[in-house]
Image (cartoon, rainbow, N blue to C red):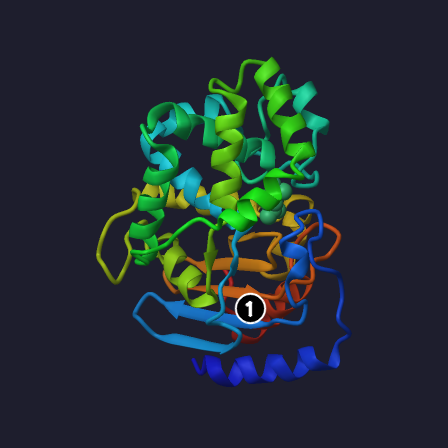
Amino acid sequence: MDYNQIFNKIRKELEKLPHKGKVADYIPELAKIDPDKLGVHLTTIDDQHYCFGDADEKFSIQSIAKVLSLAMAYKQEDEKLWKRVGVEPSGTPFNSLLQLEHDNGKPRNPMINSGALVVCDVLVSYLKNPKEEFLEFVRKVSGIPDLQYSEKIASSERSMSYINTALINLMKYFGNIHNDIEVVMDFYVNLCSIEMTCKELAHTFLFLANDGVNPYSKERIITASKTKRINAIMQLCGFYDQAGDFSFKIGLPGKSGVGGGIVAVHPGKYSIVVWSPRLNKQGNSSKGMEFLEMFTTETKYSIF
Ligand code: GLN
């Protein structure tokens, strides 16, 4: 498949469409990003690479990191994890408080903020140095040996984390946060602060397209069964109250972040990352959605 030709065609189509949405501004550091950045990188499991635009510029991966913390916690906890967090789509915004009270502090899934905070709590419980050990895990998965957290982005988010503070307090009240709230929150804002390029992120997610094994290093990150289940969670919950729409239009498991990134995985074939910072009202990259819809329509490569 000549992905370059398809990318060019889509790029021309996108240029005809108006710019939609705006950059995330509730995290002050993210409000500074140039809204018109556009980068795409596709990596196949047999080591082919296709890219264009700002694919080599680092951006804040934000909620995309929730998939990596989930992989690490699931690996450790096995099926016990689901006692603390569910696997059902929420149909609510990523930072919603609504269902938590009704569900006695058990988040619907690990892709919304409440669920990701519980996953962080699980990791804080069993890791000696959570921040260092998680970073080590992401370094291994991504193949970026000098990867760091962005202190600037983490502290910017920390200064404005009123809703996440409400979520974590509510869950603490219900007994679903076992550690100190400040420690869990600090871990969460740090993992959201990681920055990668489209190319690096596509590489990082390739294990989910290859039954849990990084096809280049041949290292097994998680089992094939857990890979299937993480992909299922991304498919059903990766885009919050737009998960159905993403599934309907794109037809791949994926995850978005408020930094404007979207990663999507085609099991057995490739992972693709689009970065475009203007977000729609559900907090997902507007152009990223448009690009991927055209891409899976044009290539006919979706899981359906
Ligand atoms: N760090 C962000 C937050 O907690 C992540 C949200 C996102 O990317 N959807 O609000």
Horizontally, residue 174 falls left or right of residue 218, namely: right
**Does residue 301 appear in the picture of this structure?**
yes
Mark 1 lies on a secondary structure that is helix
**Does residue 304 appear in the picture of this structure?**
no
In the displayed structure, 223 sits above or below 29; it is above
- According to the image, label 1 marks what residue? 296
The residue most toward the left is 218
In the displayed structure, 109 sits above or below 4; it is above
Crowd tier of the residue under label 1, counting other residues whose Cα lies within 10 Å: few below 14, some 14–19, many 20 or above: some
Query: Could you tell me residue 171's position as x and y percent?
Result: 59, 20
Q: Nearer the viewer, residue 152 or 95?
A: 152
The quadrant in which residue 276 appears is: bottom right
Mark 1 close to ligand 1, CB under 8 Å: no
The quarter of the image that holds ligand 1 is top right
Q: Nearer the viewer, residue 53 or 67?
A: 53
Query: Could you tell me residue 68's position as x and y percent?
Result: 42, 45
Looking at the rendered structure, the kind of residue marked 1 is Thr
